[in-house]
Image (cartoon, rainbow, N blue to C red):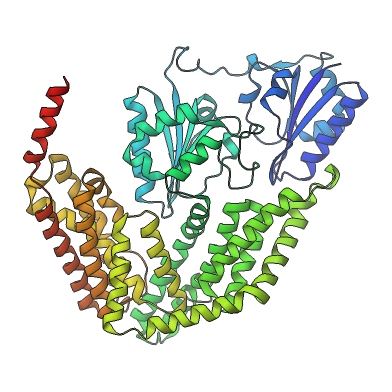
Amino acid sequence: MANLVAVTACPTGIAHTFMAAEALRRAAQAAGHVLRVETQGSVGAQDALSAAEIAAADAVILAADVAVDEAPFAGKPIVRAGTNDAIRNAPALIAQATGGAPVTPAAAAPTTPARGGAGNRPLSVVGVTSCPTGIAHTFMAAEGLEGGAKSLGYRVKVETQGSVGAGNPLSAQDIAEADVVIIAADTNVDLARFTGKRVYQTGTKPAIKDGAAVVRTALSEAGVYGAAGAGTAAAGSGDYVADAAAAKAAKNAGVPSFYKHLMTGVSHMLPLVVAGGLLIALAFAFGGINAEGPFAQALMKIGGGSGAFGLFVPVLAGFIAFSIADRPGLAPGLVGGMMAIATGSGFLGGILAGFIAGYFTRWLNRSLKLPRTLEGLKPTLLLPLLGTLVTGLLMIFVIGQPVAAALTAATNWLNSLGNTSAGLLGAVLGGMMAFDMGGPINKAAYTFSTGLIDSKVYGPIAAAMAAGMTPPIALFLATLLFKNRFTADEREAGKAAGVLGISFITEGAIPFAARDPLRVIPSLMAGSAVAGAISMAAGCLLRAPHGGIFVLAIPGAVTNLPMYVVAILAGTLVSTVLLGVLKRPVEQEVAPVVQDAVAAD
């Protein structure tokens, strides 16, 4: 009697996957052998093989029509076939695996270099970085990981999941050769391709601050993704953390699961909001304040409620649910977002719909147990049907109307604010935008302001963009006007910060804040608060929620443009002056450091 393990997988992860598994089980039982099968279906891996089961196996059968990670089976005899072969001729595959026919040993497969430490090559680190906007934090975190790994003498390759797709993508060979996988992300990253690898998760900020420390922590604390008992959630759940230590690291990094789920939705929503806002602004530019004329009306339809703006709440809800429950959550989330629009509950209702759809669908996926022959009904019929039904009913009868009333009240209150009250709100939003420059506080202010666009409240987003532009621009000016307060590297970085600032990428200020937070952050918050306050108090409105100064040239994009420019300039001036006053000359700061270094020697 032989002890066998198998993996079945097909492109859809439904019929052929489970039919091949059942055929192999029956053939093994008929031949008197023990067989454990892992099915890699559309809702993730089911009955995942443990490391102990693989170690005890005499041979492995891979009946798959898609790529399967073979790293966990290193050193084991492997029989490779398609799902059709397993369905039609399972006894032959069982016989081949048990010695009745030649097997394909793992040793015959392409070999990978020896592992780091005891082998002939350095440790290999691969990573993935991602942030909600897919711009600054994504690439700064990648740079931090690469620099940290190289400083420790390790090989490194980092994939950036940015706003234009994956950059420097990891190949199957890169992943197979990796000793550890580091996910430095503020959104959820699909981990399916890292099954069987040691995975460590954290946010982008730790990687930006000290990439070497993140690499060291990952090597000591990473757990095997997909190993039995190693994770806090089932594979495919969309909420997986490799082990308890990784979960703790993610928590310490300030990226709890609910924030990641929300930011995943926001990251997919933002392109629609930006495209819709710019198209509406262009409609005003070509057709006046009423967007008159066929071309202006067409632009308004494409960008407005019939086009981009009509989609952004469903997409927000859909991808929050997708982040929580993977593919099965997408349909319930999208429909829940549509119900949010139908009930008038707007983006607040969309956020609630996304979380309801995601968590209910994930719970249903884990709780609903079916015979193996009916397992394929879950992702195609039961999960989307029940998830959509429950989410839709809750939105219509329980959640939609109260949230709509609250949103209407908030909208009326915002529209009725006087200059003083509006200025105070603008100051709060401005301070939040500069507090962590792209972090959770910044994103909370920006998400709040962006969501109000759907309710035709354009003042908060104007304040948020003005406040978000001032920190990097102020640092650029400060490096020119107060050169002795900055190192040569900082003065050089100031040029890049200026470009990022006029493009409304607040993250350009992060390197300066990281080096001297107690002086830089208060200076930037004060200037951003001034910019936000002036913008709101002056009644400035912005219909395009991104783009920096490049949007200001579009007629109709900004209401009360002269005062909006004044707000940005005033905020920048305040931060620039405070930086010059609060920061010490570099020479006064360097001397004690040098003395300490000499004393340490």
The residue positioned 58% from the left and 47% from the top of the image is 239
Q: How many marks?
A: 0
Q: Nearer the viewer, residue 96 or 139?
A: 139
Is residue 585 in sight in this rendering?
yes
Residue 185 % position (x, y):
45, 45
Quarter of the N terminus within the rendering: top right
Quarter of the C terminus within the rendering: top left
Q: Examine the image and state in which quarter residue 176 appears.
A: top right
Q: Is residue 102 above or below residue 211?
A: above
- Left or right? Give the position of 454 relative to 22: left
Q: Is residue 1 above or below residue 271?
A: above
Residue 276 % position (x, y):
44, 70
The residue positioned 85% from the left and 45% from the top of the image is 371
- Left or right? Give the position of 330 relative to 149: right
The residue positioned 32% from the left and 54% from the top of the image is 436
Residue 75 % position (x, y):
65, 15
The residue positioned 61% from the left and 64% from the top of the image is 334
- Left or right? Give the position of 512 relative to 243: left
Q: Examine the image and state in which quarter residue 498 appears.
A: bottom left
Residue 363 % position (x, y):
69, 53
